Amino acid sequence: MSDEYLIPKDVRDVPRPFLIVCEGMSDVRFIGSLLEHIGITTCSVGCPSREGLGNSIPRYLQGIRAITLGKESFRGILIIIDANDKPTQQFTTIQQALRNANFPAPEKPFSVEGDLFRVAVFLIPRKGENGTLEKLLLEAALENRPDMQTCLDNFCDCTRSVKTWTTNQQAKMRLSALVAASCQDNPWASAGIMWSEPGNPVPIESECFNHIADFLKIFVS
Amino acid sequence: MSLAIKQESYAALSYEAEGYLMIKKLRIENFRCFKSTSIEGFRRVNIIVGKNAVGKTALLESIKLGLDGLPGTLPWLNQIRTIPTVNLPNSTQEQFEAQFLGFFHLLESQGEIVISIDDSKHRTAKVRVHFDPSKIATMQPQPMGFQPPQAVPAVPPTTIIPLAFDRIDFEGKKDTLIATVLPNGQMFLQPGKHLGIASGLISITYYGGPGENAMWLSQMSIEKRSDEVKQAIRKHFSLISDVTSETPLPGLSMLYADIPSLPQKIALSLVSAGISRLFTMILAVVQYKRGAVLIDEIENGIYFEQYPQIWETLIDLAKHHDTQLFISTHSLECLRGSLETIKANEDDFLILRLEKENGLPKITPIEGKFIEAAIEQGFDVR
């Protein structure tokens, strides 16, 4: 994946008409790869800076507000975050963050709202399901290599402790192990950089991402 | 004949405001690049950003004119833009108007400049500037301008159509002052008081004449309130142990710096033009208490490491003295240097971002909390 979707540092404006805000670089790279795959070129993708104290989506949205005020070329924001175990709370937090940044806020998640300026919130993995991006990426990887499921289960058993972890923690660990074992040139590869690594075990063309791709198409249409 | 405007006297007329009157709203018509613009919601510190030639300096000038409403303001604004005021004996109408043409939008001197300002008590001051043929007959040569009363010059009445300043001050009082040129080439600038809020403008080229700064410091010293400005400059520049107003020659007052390693004091401007400019800013914020200080390109001549402390010093003094600040900057470093001060004073800050849209300036106000977030995220809000 190229970084052409990524909002650069020191930016004075959102470079493209729509902005997709994610929680971190792993999400940014995934969404960027997906946009590239499905041929959407009207979106920039960004996430809060990890430097300093402003590393939260609410602060990021306020910063975006500062640089986009009065700029009619900026036409919408889609926020993509993990549902985790509390999707309702996640949504209301983002809803409030949008309002605090003087952006319109959608009434419900998975809904593209607004006419002149669009807003939407998408909770990963999908509607009605708890979890994180890693859960979704793991699904796609295992769909591609179903035989790895048993291997990962066995590995978890061997570690003894992992089985007591939460589902989200286990998904992250399993994905990391799978990525490490797949990227020979860079076994340190993470979900954030695996998209440009040879051996990346997560196929961006996986049907597991179709629902997100469809939502992105609706958002920019 | 060229007109040397006596800024000392001009300044002396300008800081008599009583009671804190913050500017809340500004309307500009036909002034410089502004055709018709309205800005409201000003805060204590208003930072003006934007590319070159979008109207940042013109915005500061409009505030200065709107607060003064004085004929003397326009030639002075020309002067600090390094445009000399030159009038020849028996000047023609065209030659006279040419001195002021640049103030009119699209250089159309047949129009009228209107600037009105609302204060925090919802009162409005307004000045309308236009060439007014009806004022020719009323024009009588008198000792005016900023000169002390003198004998009336023996010159015949002028036939020049004067530039009229129809004024309404914040108390609602109306009057008209004029600018014209006498047949002998002397500029006639009718003096008056400002419209109710005192203001000082520090430009790139003008940051107080030596005498003006020295006079301010002397006045503060007499009133036993010079310590805070001296402390402020010592905080920024530890090499300076004291700044004083001295008179090395009769009629020449200047600021001098005491640097312990030197055998005698030296002129502050010899230490550093940047330090001298910063000292002027500090003096001005104190001097124009309960008024407004307008600073063009604050970063000029100042090392970047000083920026955070400068913001802190200026806001502290501005809060202490109820001074409102309008500050332009090109510098992202300077803007980022304001982060900690904005965090501590979020509601006191407003950024006005100027851009050109269809050839006209577009002004976007950005509140303190959004500026803070943008700086934190590494965005460029200029």
Image: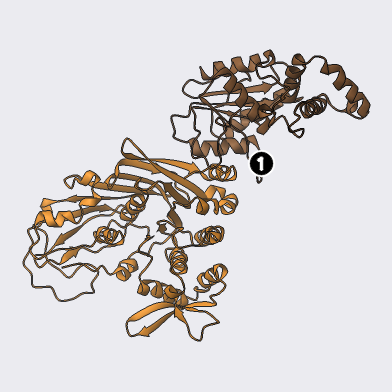
Chain colours: A brown, B orange
Q: Position of residue B127 (x, y in %)?
A: 27, 51
x, y percent for residue B34: 30, 44
- From the viewer's perspective, is A151 left or right of B355? right
Q: Which residue lies most toward the front here?
A: A185
Residue A22 image-quadrant placement: top right
**What is the number of callouts on the image?**
1
Q: Residue at x 71, y 20 (%)?
A: A125
A175 to the left or right of B166: right
**Crowding at mark 1 (Cα within 10 Å: few <14, some 14-19, many 20+):** few
Eyeballing the image, is A207 above or below A197? above
One can see residue A24 in this view: no
Helix, strand, or loop for circle 1? loop
Q: Residue at x 36, y 46 (%)?
A: B26
Q: Classify the position of the N terminus of chain A by image quarter.
A: top right
| Relative to A199, residue A210 above or below | above
Q: Is residue B236 visible?
A: yes
Q: In this rendering, is residue B220 above or below B314?
A: below
| Mark 1, residue position | A50
Q: Please state which of residues A93 and A190 is positioned toward the viewer in this rendering.
A: A190
Q: Is residue B169 above or below residue B247?
A: above
Tell me the residue at 33%/44% (across/down).
B27
Kindly identify the amino acid type of the residue bearing the numbered disc 1: Arg
Image spot of residue B228 (x, y percent): 53, 70
Image point (47%, 36%), residue name = A69
Host chain of mark 1: A
